Image (cartoon, rainbow, N blue to C red):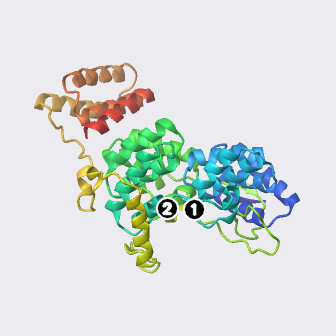
Amino acid sequence: MTALSLSEALTALEKRLSTSSAEEVERVLEEARALRRMHPEAVRVLRLEAHASLRAQRWSEAAEVFERVVSIVPTDGAALAGLAHALHQLGRTAEAAAAARQALDYLPHAEGVRAVLGGACEGNAAYRAALLNLRVGRLSQAVRRLQSLAQANPDRLDMRLMASLALWRVGAYIVAAEQCMALLNTAPDVLAAHVVLGDVWHRAGASSLASWHWSVVARFDPDHSEVRALFGQQTPAALLQGRTSLAYGAEHTPQAALTLNLHPREEETPQPTPSWSKAWLPLVDSDTHEEVNMPQMPAEQVAAWDSLEDQAGFVELQDFQFSRSEATQWQPAPHEHRDMPDEAAATLEQARRALRHAKGQQLDELIATLERMRARTPDNAELLTLLGQAYLRRGDTERALATYQQALAKM
């Protein structure tokens, strides 16, 4: 028996699923469920089980697992398409139509999805245009328009997430973190939001809180393969430094690439499912690996999409007009002791050193001291950040998050 990593085991099962018979689908589904028992929250395992359940025509089970996948990766077009098909088969037509319309924003040419809608919908062209602007480097326009779309569609978690990712990409870390925290209040398991928050806290020097978000990421993506697919070359290095290798005993014979095909025919050749991550990551030259901020489509098509956005009545948000040179203003400067008397600043520095080893009663006394300081200087972001670290060290996650959120608002 060969010991495979989790990623290798999943890749092998995905390849088997794409060309397997009905009997083989059942075996793949059984093995996927065995992997899920070992990693019940790993999104790639969930996605495999969902697709296998769909192939096995277990509509209720497929819908349930696809919904779980979308709660972790709300921008997964293939999962949304699978969810739409399963819900349609269950007769839940309104829910199926909503999922199908959302899926078309990422898979605009998926005929199986159009079949759910009766071929009458083209998806949200304004949203796709905003993603295009982001990809080709028209960042100020992309951020402004994604923010406007997110505000106009608060129930679309994927739009809210993409607006946050756009802000993070241009270096507006504080605003991006605020929006990710608001998103997690509604949907606590969104993987990309945890990646962004982990990166922001790491940049701010709040290593304990960053580690907490990295631990959440590890639950959903143990080998970081999903994060790499979502973030590409922009994957935070601090996250990958803690990468672990997980091995599983399995015997698999890879055959062909996984494809989502809602209406398969024997003569069709499997095609790989497009990755939604291409929709927001910058274009990269395959030879130089440098960003290419030029559209890879006719100029008239880009102009046509821009026209669609303009017709949608976007709100002008001047606060989100960024350039790369302006982005640094959003990065918190550690240990600046802003708006704090010298004596209090010295006390804060002592508290910072004490926190490295404080525990038990000493930690409680340290928190009490910081709370007294907060009563005198409630707007000091550095003090609030340190207090959040202290609460996190004590295990009081709710107070830590609330304090960090206050710190973000003051930075």
Q: Is residue 317 placed above or below 284 in the rendered structure? A: above
User: Amino acid type of disc 2?
Assistant: Ala
Tell me the element at label 2: helix
Label 1 amino acid?
Answer: Glu
Q: Position of residue 271 (x, y in %)?
A: 68, 71
In the rendered image, residue 112, in percent from the top left (x then y), is placed at 70, 62
Q: CA distance from mark 2 to mark 1?
A: 7 Å
| Mark seen at residue 125 | 2
Residue lying at 35% horizontally and 35% vertically, measured from the top left: 405
Query: Does residue 339 sit above or below 252 in this rendering?
Result: above
In the image, taking residue 89 as reference, residue 403 lies left or right, namely: left
Above or below 409: residue 313: below
Q: Is residue 166 left or right of residue 190?
A: left
**CB within 8 Å, label 2 to label 1:** yes
Please tell me how many numbered marks the rendered image carries: 2
Residue at 39% over, 25% down: 359
Check disc 1 and report the residue beneath it: 122
Quadrant for the N terminus in the image = bottom right
Residue 309 visible in image: yes
Choose top left, top right, bottom left or bottom right for residue 264: bottom right
Q: Quadrant of residue 324?
A: bottom left
